[in-house]
Image: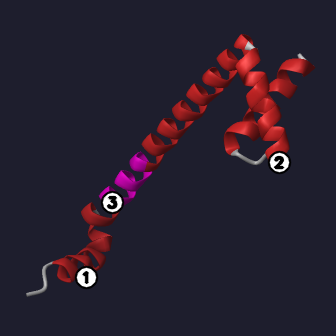
Amino acid sequence: MRTSLNNIARIEVHLLGSQKPTDALLFEARLLLDDSLQVDVSAQKQVYSMVRQYSRKQLKQEIEAAHEQLFSQPEHLSFKQKITRLFFKS
């Protein structure tokens, strides 16, 4: 268990580019020689991609909720009018 956590940490440091140049070269050499490390790096990249996609989706939903609240509720009418004037000045 501890070994896999250490591998995950090493891969993360490599993927984030926060290694010393010598450590990065050593990791790249290990990557060329170790097929299971290649699989682990690929899987971790995929996980990071999925996390980014999920985060974007969540942020988009939060922005949409704020937009809906600000532009549809009567108590925010003056704000809506000010914003509208900014974009439709002639």
**Tag in front: 2 or 3:** 2
Residue 5 relative to residue 18: left or right: right
Is 72 magenta? The answer is no
Residue visible at 13% across and 85% down in the picture: 89
The secondary element bearing badge 1 is classed as helix
Q: Quick one: label 2 or label 3, which is nearer the N terminus?
A: 2
Q: Amino acid at mark 2?
A: Lys
- The residue that label 3 is drawn on is 67
Percent coordinates x, y for residue 86 in the rendering: 22, 82
Q: Mark 2 — residue?
A: 20
Q: Residue at x 40, y 55 (%)?
A: 63
Above-or-below relation of 15 to 33: below
Q: Earlier in the sequence, mark 2 or mark 1?
A: 2
| Mark 3 element type | helix
Residue 33 is drawn in which quadrant?
top right
Kindly identify the residue that appears in the image at 31 percent across and 72 percent down.
76
User: Regarding mark 2 in the picture, which secondary structure is present there?
Assistant: loop
Instruction: Check if residue 64 falls in the magenta segment.
Output: yes
Q: Which residues are magenta?
A: 60-69
